[in-house]
Amino acid sequence: MLILLSDAFDPGLPDKLKKYGEVTDDKGRVAEAEVVLIRSKTKVTREYIDGAPKMKLVIRGGVGLDNVDREYAKQKGIIVHNTAAASSVAVAELAFAMMIAMPNHIAKADSSMHNGQWLKKELKRTELYQKTLGIMGMGRIGSEVAKRAKAFGMKVLAYDPYVKSSDLAEMKTDLKDMLGMSDYVSLNMPLTDETRGILNRDTLAACKNGAYIVNTGRGKCVIEEDMVEALKSGKLAGFATDVWYSDPPENSPLMSAPNVLMAPHIGASTNENLLRIGDIIDELIGEYVKK
């Protein structure tokens, strides 16, 4: 059995998996591969699947599966898995780091010091304490974000049509209602037909004036042009994002918009998480081999 590592994983993963067969990172051998391991870069499209006639198992190291044509894979009898349980802490920590960084002007404070400026009077901070956080998507990552918000003394609201109750947040059934009450918003939704463009001109208008929004979910859950408009008008105080329409982004209006904190899709890229992903991949391949 040939196992193809099509994207970057922990360097120790090939040794962990060699008990199952040959392990390679040579993408030119995709046609020979029975198992393909991907992250966000590789797109398992219809064309990709047709070019991999021996493929029986695809494992996405991470959460989102929007880069896999799951319907066509199912038609071809290909099993598709992710490693959702691995990444929750890593992504939640980045989301919270961004939430802390924006009202504390960490990026601007650092860059101004490097430029020889002393902006002690200009950089006015605000606290997270006793502010309201609205979480869009109360799954594993959203729940981890909520735990951290509670530790900071924040009130936590959440919107998720598929979650009726939570011990970590007050669930809201109306998204606009929640947005209007939230000083901070953390977007932790996968990309689906329901969530595509969910933050748009209409929903952004419902946000509390001066709110901050953090997106560690999926880039296409946000209409970028509408977000830029909300930032330029002062409706929003800031927007932080780790996710984009493409990796890397191409001609994104966010790149030149005011009050944007950007990261290059590093939410799941902690050393600890890569090890957890490897452990889950090992388990999934082991289960596959036993069948």
Image: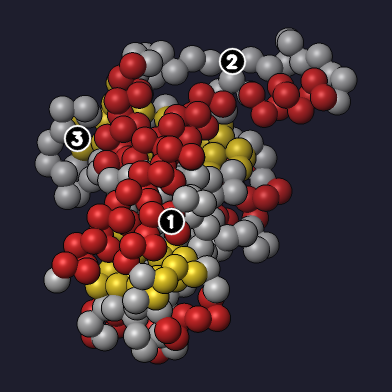
Q: Residue at x 41, y 44 (%)?
A: 275
61 or 15, nearer to the observer: 15
Distance, label 3 to label 2, CA atoms, is 29 Å
Residue 14 lies in quadrant: bottom left
231 or 233, nearer to the observer: 231
27 or 186, nearer to the observer: 27
Q: Is residue 198 visible?
A: no
Identity of the amino acid at label 3? Answer: Met
Please give left or right for residue 284 compared with residue 185 in the image: left
Q: Quadrant of the N terminus?
A: bottom left
Which label's residue is closer to the chain start, 1 or 2?
1
| Residue 33 percent location from the top left of the image | 40, 79
Q: Which residue is mark 2?
A: 125
Q: Residue furthest right?
A: 116
Q: Residue furthest front?
A: 19
| Residue 200 percent location from the top left of the image | 44, 53
Q: Which residue is mark 1?
A: 15
Identity of the amino acid at label 1? Answer: Asp
Q: Are marks 1 and 2 in contact (CB under 8 Å)?
A: no
Q: Is residue 56 visible?
A: yes
Identity of the amino acid at label 2? Answer: Arg
Q: Decide: is 56 above or below 82.
A: below
Distance, label 1 to label 2, CA atoms, is 48 Å
Label annotation for residue 171? 3
